[in-house]
Every structure is written in C-alpha cells, then in structure tokens.
Image (cartoon, grey):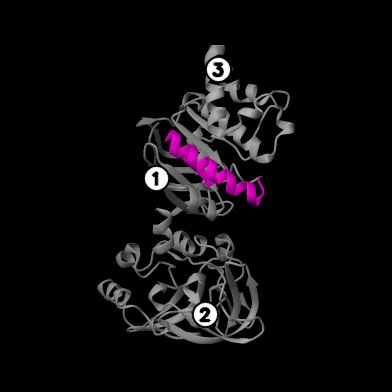
Amino acid sequence: MASIVFEHVTKRYADGLEAVKDMNLTISDGEFMILVGPSGSGKSTALRMAAGLEGITEGVLKIDDAVVNDLASRDRDIAMVFQSYALYPHMTVRDNIGFPLKLAGTPRSEIARRVEEAARTLDIESQLDRKPANLSGGQRQRVAMGRAIVRDPKAFLMDEPLSNLDAKLRVQARTAISRLHDRLGTTTIYVTHDQIEAVTLGDRIAVMRAGQIQQVGTPRDLYEAPNNLFVAGFIGSPSMNFLPGDLDGDHVRTAIGDLKIADTLRRRLESGNGGGRRGVIVGIRPEHFEDPTLVTLPETGHTFNARIDVLEALGSDDFAHFTVDSERVASSELDGLLEDTGAGVASAADGVQIVARLGAGSRVRRGQQAELWVDTSRLYLFDPDSGLSLLSSEFSRTGRPDAAQAAPPSNIPVH
C-alpha cells in the first residue's frame, strides 16, 4: 500500500487546453478516494497521470513518497481496472487473471495459488475454466478486478469500472468492491461520474469540475456542508432545488414564502460576512419537504400551497414536482453549469421547477393544489455572484472567489 500525492499538478495539451489545473490532493495509505464530476471535468485525466498513461505538464506526483513524474507506468506498482474490461477472449478466466503474473515470470505454482485466492475473494471460483464470452457483465467485471488483485499492487486505479453494468448489477458490484477494499485495505483511486457510486463507496470524495477540485470531504461533509452551488447541485439525489431569495435578518423571502432561518445559521452568518440584507440563492433538498400531515411539529418549519404538476409514486416515497413563480436572469457565465451537476432543467418558462420527496403516506395528489411543508432549519444559502456558500471559509475570506472555480449552476433564477 502507499500514499498518493498530487502537488500543483497541471495537464496542458498542445492546443492549450488545460484538462487538469493546479490539482492538490493527498490520498492516504489505504484510503478509498473517489474522483467524481461530469464529463470533461478532468477526473480520468488525473487518474491517467497517476497511472503514468498521461504526462504531467507542471507539478509533482508522488507515490509512496517517491516522485514518479518520469517513471514508466510498469514501474509504478499500480494496477488499473478500466471501463472496458479488456479481457482476452481466447483465454479462460484462470489464464486472464494470472496473465500479469505470467508476464512477470512468476512460478506456475505461485500463479495458481494467487489466482485461486483472488477467485475466492471475488466469489468466481466456479468460473475459472470458462471463457469471457460465457460470463455475465458482472462476472467479467470481477475477472478484471481479479487480474488487478493478483499483482498485490501498492494501489488500485479504477476508471468507471461499473459503467457498462445495468442498474441491478451495478448495486451488486458496488457492494463487492466495498467488501474487497475492506478486506485488502489497498489504496484506491476510483473515478466515476455517478454521485451515488461516489457517496456509497468512498472514504472521501474529490468533486471536480472544469479541471479543478471544487471540494474534498467525506460523503456526509459534501452533503451537509457543500462549499458552493456546483457541489450542492451535484451531490444528492434528486438534486438540490434552488430559488432566489432576499435575506433580511432572521428571514429569507422566497417565492414559497418568508422562511425563518435557524438561530444557529443566523449566528454563523452574523459572525462572518454573510449577514445583513442581501440577495441570495436558497438551496432546499427534496427530502427536506414533506406533507404537513406527516410532520410531528409542523410549526418548526414553513407551510405553503403548490399545484402538483407530476407525482411519482415509488412505494417507499413520492416525488412531487411543482412550479413556483420566479424571475430568472440569463447569463453566459452561468449557462451550462446546471447541466454539469446532472440536476436537469430547473427553470421553466413560467417559473422554477421544484421536486419534493414526500413520505409514502402522503395525501398529495397530481393535478391538485396541495399543502406542503419545508424544514427551514435545513436551508442552504449561496452568494449569487460567486456561487459560494455564505458559510464557507472561502466566502468569509474573500467574498468573491475565482468565478471559474465556484461559479453557480445555470438556469438558477437570480434577482
């Protein structure tokens, strides 16, 4: 096992495109680190630099405290698992798993022992004499994992290994990978664009956009305290809702009413520079709405009326979609960023679309005017210019950061 450290790492191509910009990240020995972000965010490029498949334009990359910028991929003692499993179709599973050891000149008896051990770990012992064409997608993925495991590398580097699996197999494979890491404890960098994979697998997550790291933290850190609008919109499913608002003392005025902010939030705003009267963007997660008939103390939040456009009944809960009247401002700077979060289109021609996640016992019905409740102790407040959370240390320090790094998603209505 080994630590992996990116120190001011930049990847710049001949045409001037910077795929990764001044990346600083320390991955501890034995840690499972997720790089997550939309397509083009630089996550796969960062992984390929760690693997030695891409050169580094600027900065230093260390594996186990040794600088490896100019070290060939084969000499870094890492194992890659790719999106395409890259199995040899004419070889059996046994031979596919043992192939890297054969290339390294490992004795046959040792190859046999390590292949059997890897197959046992991955529960594919019964598949060892089959060819890849006779395996399911999930089994092929395990064979690719087995080929990495037998090498006993310092680190695993995984580039969207589950993207070719269907939804059910993906859940099973996530569980298998998590158990495997618990058993082996090998340092792992795992790249994905799927935030559900990220929050269920990673010890920590680095959220990337446009070649830059937006925030690094545990899944709970990113969910509960996102630094900016991009992270807030990217982490969580369904995505966070955004509304324009006007902060005034202990209330924020929005299209769904005047929302009283929690005393703890008010005090934190007053202690920084986020207090006073000002325009804000209010973030509300779908799960912080509810049917007021299901709330024990509805007076602890805010109740309002909305006409339900769409109701998705999923059994365990209901997703209620509704539209609120709100202004929005078109901005070339904001354009396209909401699409990056995977949140979909948040603004309609006649207002802003909101999704509320309600308990299965909800009496809310499609096409009807319904009473809804929102937990005002769980509001998120963002600066509409920089996109930073008003509670972030960067906002307290600067008020307006580099717009390219923390710009808010598009289609978010602002006054």
**Residue at 53% of width from left, 19% of height from top?**
113
**Residue at 50% of width from left, 82% of height from top?**
293
Of labels 1 and 3, the one closer to you: 3
Q: Is residue 59 visible?
A: yes
Image quarter for residue 176? top right
**Residue at 67% of width from left, 49% of height from top?**
166
Q: How far across and how far down the image is residue 53, in percent?
A: 54, 33
CA–CA distance in space, label 2 to label 3: 60 Å
Residue type at mark 3? Ile
Residue type at mark 1? Leu
- Going from N to C along the chain, the mark reached first, 1 or 3, is 1
Q: Is residue 187 visible?
A: no
The residue where tag 2 is placed is: 291
Of 203 and 315, the residue lying toward us: 315
The magenta stretch is 165-191
Q: Secondary structure at mark 3?
A: helix
Q: Is residue 91 left or right of residue 380?
A: right
Of 137 and 317, the residue lying toward us: 317
Of labels 2 and 1, the one closer to you: 2
How many other residues sit within 10 Å of disc 1, few (<14), some (14-19) or many (≥20)?
some
The residue where tag 3 is placed is: 111
On screen, 144 above or below 410?
above
The residue where tag 1 is placed is: 25
Is residue 199 found inside the magenta-colored segment of the image? no
How many other residues sit within 10 Å of disc 3, few (<14), some (14-19) or many (≥20)?
many
Residue type at mark 2? Asp
